[in-house]
Amino acid sequence: MTNDPTQSDPESARLASPNAWFEDASAWIVRGGVLLGALRAVQALALSLGIGRTEAAAVAEAVVGAAYVGVAHALAGLLLAAPVRALGAWLDGYGREGSRHGPAVASFAPPPTPPDAPSAAPVPVAPGRDAGERAAEVRDLIREGEWEAADERARAFVADHEGDPRGPALFEELERARRDAADRWREQLQAAREVNDPARVLELYEGVPPVLDDPARRDLDSELASWFLAVVHRRLRSGLLQIEVVTLVERVSATFGHTKEGASLRAALPTLRRGAGLCARCGKPYTGLADACPECLGGAAPPPPVIPELDPVDDLEPISAEDEEPSWFLDDDEEQNDGNPDGEANGRLRP
C-alpha cells in the first residue's frame, strides 16, 4: 500500500504526464481553429447579405470581432507554449534518467576508504584458476629464457600449492630448458672456434647461460684463454703487427685476466701497442720515441736526439766567389814548376 497519488488516481497521473498536456493542447487547437473559422464565416455572411447598420448589428459585429481576436490569441499562446513545454518535459525526463542510472554507475566504483581505516582483505580467488595462471606465467618465463625469475616463481608456486602436481613438473621443465639452452650455447661456441672467429667467441662468452657451476666455469675460462693465446701467437707469426691484434689482446686480457694466459697477454700488451704505433699506456696512436704519449706523460714530446758526429751547418766556412775551383788531382806541369825536376807524382792530392 503506497501513498502515491498517481497510483491511487489514474486521471491525476494522466494529467501530470507531459504527453497528456500535449494531447489536450492539440484538441483545443483544433476546436479553436473551428471556432475561428465559424466566426470569420459569420462576419463574411453579414457583409455579403448587406445587413443594416443597426445598433444591434453593430454590437453583434463587435462581439464577433472581439471573440475572434480572443480565440486567435489563445491559440497563439498554446502554439508558443508547446515548444517550451516540450523542452521542460525533455529536461525533466533527462534528469529522471540520470537519477535512475546514477546509483547503478556509481556502484561500480569502490567506496572511499578512510585514511585511518585498515585496508580490506583481498577477495579470495578460486585455487584452481589461480594455480593455473601462475603455472602459465612460469612457463612463459621459461620460454623467454628468464631463468632466475622462472626459478623464483616456481619455488613460490610449490610453497603455496604443496599438493599440486604441477609444481614438480615446472621444475623439470625449467631444468630441461636450461640444459637445452646450454647445449645450444656450446654448439655455437664450438662453431665459432672452428672458424677462428675470436670476436664471436667473446660475444658468446659474455652471454653464457647461468647453468655452469663454478668448477665447470673455471675449466671453460682456462680452455678459452689458452685458445685465445694460440690465436694471438698465430697472428703475430703471420707478419706485420696490426691494430686488430692489439684490440683483441686488450679484450681477452680484460675478460680472462684471472687466468694464467690472460695475465700473460696483459703483460705483453704495452709492447704490442708500441709495435703497432700506439701509446703503451692509453693505446692511442703515437709514433714518438718516448715510452708513452705526451698526454700520458703529462708534458710535451721530447725533441729528437742530436747526433754528435755531425757538425752543425752554421759552423761551416763559406766559400768565397773569388776562389777558383780547386784541382783534386796532381798536375805534372805544376809539379815541375814547383821545383821538382823529375816531374814524378808523389801520390798526394793537392787542391
Image (tube, rainbow, N blue to C red):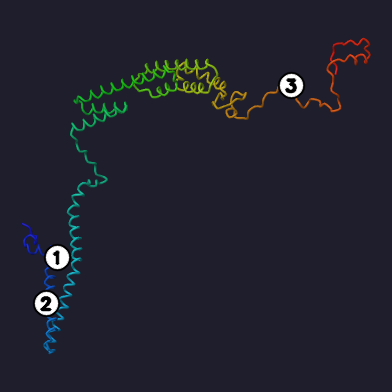
Image point (19%, 48%), residue name: 107
Instruction: Tell me if mark 2 has few (under 14), some (14-19) or many (20+) residues whose alpha carbon lies within 10 angstroms of its own.
Output: some
Q: Amino acid at mark 2?
A: Ala
The disc label shown at residue 22, or none: 1
Instruction: Tell me if mark 3 has few (under 14), some (14-19) or many (20+) residues whose alpha carbon lies within 10 angstroms of its own.
Output: few
Q: Residue 118 in the image: x percent, y percent?
A: 24, 42
First of labels 2, 3 by sequence position: 2
Q: Residue 338 in the image: x percent, y percent?
A: 93, 15
Q: Which is more toward the observer, 27 or 140?
A: 27
Q: Residue 81 in the image: x percent, y percent?
A: 19, 68
Label 3 to label 1: alpha-carbon separation: 128 Å
Q: In the image, is residue 23 above or below residue 345?
A: below
Q: Split into 4 quadrants, where in the image is the C terminus?
A: top right
Label 1 to label 2: alpha-carbon separation: 24 Å
Question: Under tag 2, what secondary structure?
Answer: helix
Question: Under tag 1, what secondary structure?
Answer: helix
First of labels 3, 1 by sequence position: 1
* Mark closer to the observer (2, 3): 2
Image point (14%, 65%), residue name: 22
Q: Residue furthest front?
A: 48
Q: Disc 3 marks which residue?
A: 310
- Marks 3 and 1 in Cβ contact (< 8 Å): no
Image point (7%, 59%), residue name: 7
The disc label shown at residue 38, or none: 2
